[in-house]
Amino acid sequence: MRLRLTPRDTAFYDQFASSARNIVEAAEVLEQLIAPGADRTTLNTRMREIEHANDENTHEIMRRLNSTFVTPFDREDIYDLASRLDDVVDFLEAAADLIVLYELQELPEPTRQVVRVLVQAAHVTAEAMPRLQSMKDLSEFWIEVNRLENEADQLYRRTLATLFNGTYDALTALKLKDVADQVEAAADAMEDVADSIETIVLKES
């Protein structure tokens, strides 16, 4: 292991963990929002609050990055991880907002399953994030997130097949595809987070 100066300040790790918790909450809110009989207006408002709080957390990471002389690992990797964590929440918020704006009553079952996969990936990420400081026992995390993203990809393809098999009229199919695209983008962004952490661990080991 190469010698490196590691500051005692754990602020970056704490903020990464906070972003991961925001992802869990955002994924769970989206899961609630697509349930039958959900109060979508209230849940969408809560989603926007989570997205705003996560933006503030990301901005604080960037401010700290610009004012800290010694960082726990490469500045570029800190920026990359913070940005990718933020992307996940942005995509989840966009999906929720489109569901409300389009007044969609129900999503195709494969899309609902992708949301459930996202909830799983969010919890796996939040549970792994505290281990970033020690850089230990993280390989199972990125392997599992990769597996879940592959599952989400398969479900996304099933969604597309469902949307364009004649079950839906053209306009509704396009609206549902917009939502499915955002949900799939969130899954991809979750894998990007895992890839960032894998890169950091490999570089620092």
Image (cartoon, rainbow, N blue to C red):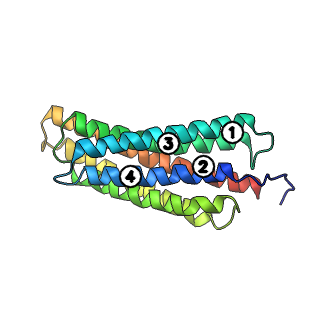
- Where 132 sits versus 159, above or below? below
State how far apart marks 1 and 3 are (Cα). 15 Å
What numbered label is drawn on residue 148? none
**Gap between marks 1 and 2 measured at Cα:** 10 Å
Q: CA distance from mark 3 to mark 2?
A: 10 Å
Q: Secondary structure at mark 4?
A: helix
Spot occupied by residue 184 in the image (x, y as percentages of width and height)? 38, 45
Residue 181 shows in the view = no
Quarter of the picture containing the C terminus is bottom right
Q: Amino acid at mark 1?
A: Arg
Left or right of residue 111: residue 24: right
Q: Which residue is mark 2?
A: 15
Q: Which residue is mark 4?
A: 27
Q: Are marks 1 and 2 in contact (CB under 8 Å)?
A: yes
Front position in the image: 50 or 3: 50
Residue at left 13%, top 41%?
168
Disc 2 marks a residue whose amino acid type is Gln
The residue nearer to you, when weighing 15 against 123, is: 15
Q: CA distance from mark 4 to mark 3?
A: 13 Å
For marks 1 and 2, the one nearer the N-term is: 2
The disc, 4 or 1, on the residue closer to the chain's N-terminal end is: 4
Residue 161: where, in percent of width, then height? 24, 46
The residue that disc 3 covers is 54
Q: Which residue is mark 1?
A: 64
Determine the image quadrant of residue 36. Answer: bottom left
Q: Could you tell which of marks 4 and 2 lies nearer the N-terminus?
A: 2
